[in-house]
Amino acid sequence: MRTASPIPLAITAALALLTGGACKTIVLPGSEGGDDDTGGTEGATSSASGASTDGGGTDGQPGDANCGELSAKMLDILDVNCAKCHGPDSAALGSINYITNLDALISNGKVVPGEPNNSALYRRMAAEMAPMPPDSETQRPSEDDIRAVEQWIGECAGVTGCGDNPWITRTHVIDLIRADLLNTLEISADARPFIRYFSLVHLYNYGWCKEQIDIYRHALSKLTNSLSNEIKVVAPVPIDPDQLIFRIDIRDYDWDVEGRVLDPVTGTFTETFRDTWELIADKDPYAIEFIGDSAEDVKQATGTRFFLLQADAFVEVAAQPPLYHDVLRIPLTRQELEASFGIDVEANVQEEVDTNPNRVARAAFHDSGVSENHRVIERHDFPNANNRVYWISYDFGSNAGDANVFVDPFNFAEDGSEIIYSLPNGLQGYMIVDEFGRRIDDAPIQIVQDKNAPDGVVRNGKSCMGCHNVGMINKEDDLRWEVDQNLGEGDFDDNELDAIRALYPTRDDYNILLGLDADRFNLAVKAAGVPLGGDKEPIVTVFNAFDEDVEIRRAAAELWTTETTLREKLGQLSPDLDNLGKNQTGVRRDVFTTAFADAICQLKVGKTKACP
C-alpha cells in the first residue's frame, strides 16, 4: 500500500489590508522630527501612550466615531466587496488598483474627506443605477456596510490621533537596546551572545496606532514560536513602553544551533552559518548592520553584526520556503521526516488493521473544500510523546481508477500530500510533498488550491498557517459513515469491512481526536500571547500586508529617515525609487526591496551587502 502525506492546507485567512492604514493621516504634520543624519530630535522618546489611540473626538476629530475601528471596518468592506477587481493583485480596471489603500483613495480624489456625497467611492457604492460592485456580482455590500463607508468618509477620512507620533530615531532605538542588553539584571554576561531584537518602530513612525500594530506583535510571537524546535512557547519580550522593540533569546527557539541551507536538488548543504539567527539575517534583504558607538557596544556584547531585524520583513522571508524549511530543518523527503519522529506509516496502518490499537485514524471526503477530488487524511500518534501527533493527507489528481479511495480505501495511489506535525512546543510544522514523497515548496494547483491567494497556489508555511488558524479543522468523514449506512461505491467483504472500521473511526470518535489536537495547538497560541480565532490570522495578514505598494512615508520609516530627508535625497538613490516622489501610491514592494540595501548605504544608515 502506498501512503502519502499531509493534511489539507487550504488557506482561509483573510487578506491583509493594513497598508495606508486605519489610523494614519494623509496630511502629514508640519514638524516631522528627524533622523540621525539631519539634525532631527535625538533621543526622542516613544510616547504614543500619551496620545489618544481610539480615534475618537478627544483628538479633535469630528463626531463620536472610533476612527481606528471604523477604518479597519472600512478596509474589510473594501476587501470583501471591491478588491477582487480593484485590489493590488488584480488588473487595474479604470486605473484603480489601490482600493484597499485608504490614503491613495484620498490622494487620488476617490474620497473627499468630510464629504461622502462628493466622493466617487461612496456615490458608486450607494447608487441605485449602475452601482459598484455591479449587479452581476453576488458579493455585495450590505446597507450597514454602505452606512459605515459614509460615516468613515464623513468623520474619519484624512484624520487621525496617531499621524503626529513623535519620531523615534534609530539612535534612540539602539540606545534602548544597549541599555536593555547591558543593564537588565536577568541578562547575564553569558546570556548576551544569544540576545537578539526585532523592531516595529517603522510602523509607529509611519503613523500607525497601537491597535493597528497589535496584529504585527501577534504575528511576530506566533511565527518565532512556529519556527521553534524547543519544548516551550516563549513570547518575545517588549523592552519599551510602547511595545515596539522586542527581545528574544535564540536559545528559546533552538536557533543557537548551526544554520544550514539544504539544496533541494543535490541534497547537500550549500551554506553554513554559526547559528540559525545568522542564517535568517543573511536571507533577510532588510537586514542592516547599524553603525555608531552604541551599535558597536551591542555588536560586541552579542557577537553579531545583525542584532536587530525589522519584524514584518522577518515574517515575509521566514514564513515561506526556502527559509521556512531551513529554519525548521525540514528534510527533503517525508520518509526522512517520519523516520526522525520514529514513525513508520505503513507499519502503523497495517497494525491498526490487524489489532486496532487506536494509534492511527483515517477519514475520507468527497468534498474537502481544498481539493477538486477526493481526499484522505490520516493521524498517527508520536511514539513516546503523547502530546505530539503527525497528520498526513493523500491528494488525488482525479477520482478514477486507483485514485478512487471510496472503491479501494487501502491501496489507493495519491498524487501528492501535505503534512502537519506537532512541534515540541504544541504549535505546528508543515510540509508539502509530491507523489514520491519529495519535499516541494508549492502544492500543484490542479490538485489543491488556496482559495484566498491571488494565484490560488498553496505555499508551504504561510498558506498552511492561514488555513489552520485554530489548529486542525473539523471535517466529518464520508467513507466510514457511508459504509455504516450501507451506502457508497465500494463492494466490501466482511474482512474489508472490519478493516475499514478499524482504520476509519466513526465521525464522533474522529471529531474527538480533532478537538484534542486543536485544543493543544490553541493552548500554545494562547501561551504566545496571540488572541484565539478571529477573522485574520496574524502571520498571513502581516505577510500579505507587507507586499502592498510602498508610499514615501512608509519608505522613509523603513529606511530610518524622515519623509523630508528622503525626498531631498531621492536623486542620490536608485532611479527605481523615483516614483516615491511622484506617485501617491508609491512603488511596488519588490522594487523597494531590490533598492533597499543600496539606499541604506547611500543614506549612511548602516551597512548592507550593497555597501562598498
Image (tube, rainbow, N blue to C red):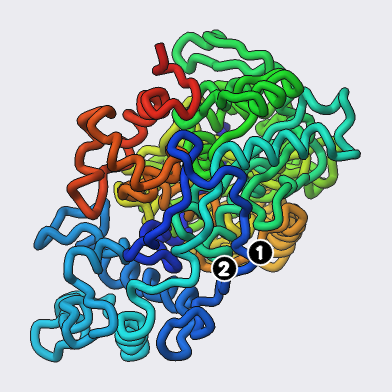
User: Based on the displayed image, in which of its 4 quarters is residue 391 positioned?
Assistant: top right
Instruction: Residue 445 in the image: state x and y as whole percent.
Output: 34, 43
What residue do we see at 65% from left, 41% from top?
A: 224
Q: Is residue 340 above or below residue 77?
A: above
What residue do we see at 32% from left, 29% from top?
A: 595
Toward the front, the furthest residue is 39
Of 360 and 307, which appears nearest the observer?
Answer: 307
Q: Is residue 396 above or below residue 274?
A: below
User: Based on the displayed image, in which of its 4 quarters is residue 446 positioned?
Assistant: top left
Q: Is residue 518 left or right of residue 600?
A: right
| Residue highlighted by disc 2 | 534
Q: Is residue 170 above or below residue 262?
A: below
- Tell me whether circle 1 and circle 2 mark residues in contact (CB < 8 Å): yes
Q: Few, some or many C-alpha atoms within 10 Å of disc 1 (few <14, some 14-19, many ≥20)?
A: some
Q: Is residue 596 left or right of residue 6?
A: left
**Which amino acid, by three-letter code, is at mark 1?**
Pro
Instruction: Residue 284 in the image: state x and y as whole percent.
Output: 49, 29
